[in-house]
Amino acid sequence: MVRSNLDRYYLLVSLVLMMSSPIAALAWENEISQDLAPLSGIVLESKSGDALFVDMGSSKGIMVGDLLSIEEEGKKIINPVTGKLMKKTSRILSLLKVTEVRTDYSHVVVIKGADNGISGKK
């Protein structure tokens, strides 16, 4: 009698785990895709020129430690038959790390690439 109750318990736990895994995976997939969704902002320079800011803050989901890239737009690849835009190429100019976050802006430091001439870049 004890053995059959234990078997039922294991079966119930196994079924719950099997059913929850796809749901958890789907939720995790949605969270990752939202976290990696591209944002668009502008690099702002302080008046003294020694600090860089971006016009994105906590209101856009930016957090301390986030990595941002400054990209230069390249060619547009268009399907000659349909006229549909297939892809835009880009080149990464700089990689920034967020060090401080406010509601509408964030302080960033350049961790790779050029740190001059990026003010005003998207």
Image (cartoon, helix red, strand yellow):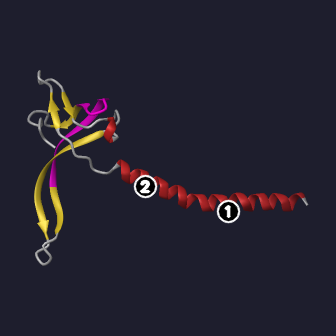
58 or 43: nearer the eye?
A: 58
Q: Which residue lies furthest to the bottom in this view?
A: 81
63 or 5: nearer the eye?
A: 63
95 or 84: nearer the eye?
A: 84
Q: What stretch is highlighted in magenta?
A: 90-108
Position of residue 73 in the picture relative to residue 9 (left or right):
left
The C terminus sits in image quarter: top left
Expressed as whole percent of the image width and height from the top left, the position of residue 52 reads 18, 29
Q: Which residue matches tag 2?
A: 30
Numbered mark located on residue 104 in the image: none
The N terminus sits in image quarter: bottom right
Q: Which residue lies furthest to the top in this view?
A: 48
Expressed as whole percent of the image width and height from the top left, the position of residue 6 reads 82, 57
Q: Is mark 1 on a helix, strand or loop?
A: helix
Q: How crowded is mark 1: few (under 14 residues within 10 Å), some or many (20 or more)?
A: few
What type is the residue that disc 1 sits on? Leu
The prevailing secondary structure element of the residues shown in magenta is: strand
Numbered mark located on residue 15 in the image: 1
Expressed as whole percent of the image width and height from the top left, the position of residue 87 reads 18, 63
Residue located at (33% from left, 50% from top): 36
What type is the residue that disc 2 sits on? Asn
Q: Residues within 10 Å of mark 2 (few under 14, many from 20)?
A: few
